[in-house]
Image (cartoon, rainbow, N blue to C red):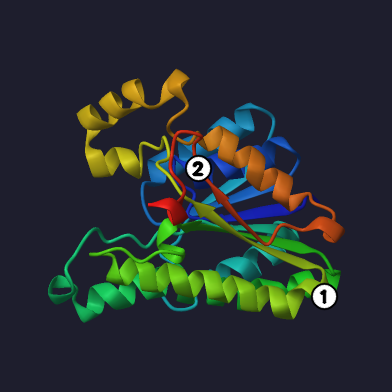
Amino acid sequence: MKPVCLVMGAGAGIGGTVGTRFANEGYHAVLCRRSDEDGLNRMVASIESEGGSASGFLVNAVEPEVIEDRVATVEKDIGPIEVVVFNLGAQIGDRALKDTSYKAFEMGWRMATFALFRIAQAVTPHMAERAKGTILVTSATAAVRGNSGQHSHAAAMGGRRMLCQSLNAEFASKGIHVAHILIDGAVDAPDTLGKMLGPERFQQLRETRGMEHDGLMLPDRIADTYFHIARQHRSTWTHEIDMRSFTDRPWWNH
């Protein structure tokens, strides 16, 4: 039975690419996303065509019991969850405070913070029993710097960061490694940045800053870092890291 890498938020950018990397390294990748079943099936088929092992599930992480049921089913039917990649986004766009509804603000928290709490509560008993496990949490610049118009996102990501710290405080001694991975830059991802900009603007950005210019973060290279963190010896665990292209100014410097 293969160890499992469970990906919550397995889109065509970071989540799916990280899941594919773990599958290529001998894990069974359980890929979960909210929509686009055809795209999910293509991702699973691509992994399997390269000799890897994967399953795909549509999961709406804000619904009650869905996360908990998925963890229980994977542990029962597929294999032990050794790695969780928590890659759910919570971006609702720039909105003035007066234009940020209670519902929109709460939705950011439910996706970014509460869903992480729920998956941690579901998976840590299994990991602690085995004294082994890794939870890799994708985060954003908003976790460390609140900008105008980012009330929901900054509050949600700040909560995500603090939750990672409290999880480490409780579970590191039990063999569970929690890493808060701050993505401090634009990612060459068609399902996130591409949708925000539109196809034409996204392609222009790729040609001027991405591709051979290396000014956009490449999902394949991000996946290298995720895999490295998951394989670290416990004497040198990385608990927080911020990543950006060499051309970008860091979050603390602008």
Q: Residue furthest left?
A: 98
Q: Residues within 10 Å of mark 2 (few under 14, many from 20)?
A: many
State the residue in front, 147 or 97. 147
Cβ–Cβ under 8 Å for marks 2 and 1:
no
- Horizontally, residue 189 falls left or right of residue 202, namely right
Measure how far apart labels 2 and 1 are at the Cα level: 30 Å
Which residue shows up at 18% across the image and 74% down it? 97
**Nearest-to-viewer mark from 2 and 1:** 2
SS label for mark 1:
helix
SS label for mark 2:
loop
Q: Name the image quarter holding residue 150.
A: bottom left
Residue 103: tell me if it is visible.
yes
Up/down of 60 relative to 163, above or below: above
Q: Amino acid type of disc 2?
A: Arg
Q: Amino acid type of disc 1?
A: Ser
Residue 68: tell me if it is visible.
no
Give the x, y percent position of residue 169: 71, 78
Which residue shows up at 28% across the image and 75% down it? 105
Q: Name the image quarter holding residue 22.
A: top right
Up/down of 156 relative to 87, above or below: below
State the residue in front, 76 or 243. 243
Q: Residues within 10 Å of mark 1 (few under 14, many from 20)?
A: few
Give the x, y percent position of residue 167: 66, 76
Sequence order check: which comes first, mark 2 or mark 1?
A: 1
Name the residue tied to disc 1.
173
Give the x, y percent position of residue 237: 77, 58
Q: Name the image quarter holding residue 148.
A: bottom left
Name the residue tied to disc 2.
244
Q: Residue furthest front?
A: 253
- Horizontally, residue 131 falls left or right of residue 6, namely right
Give the x, y percent position of residue 49: 61, 27
Up/down of 126 relative to 32, above or below: below
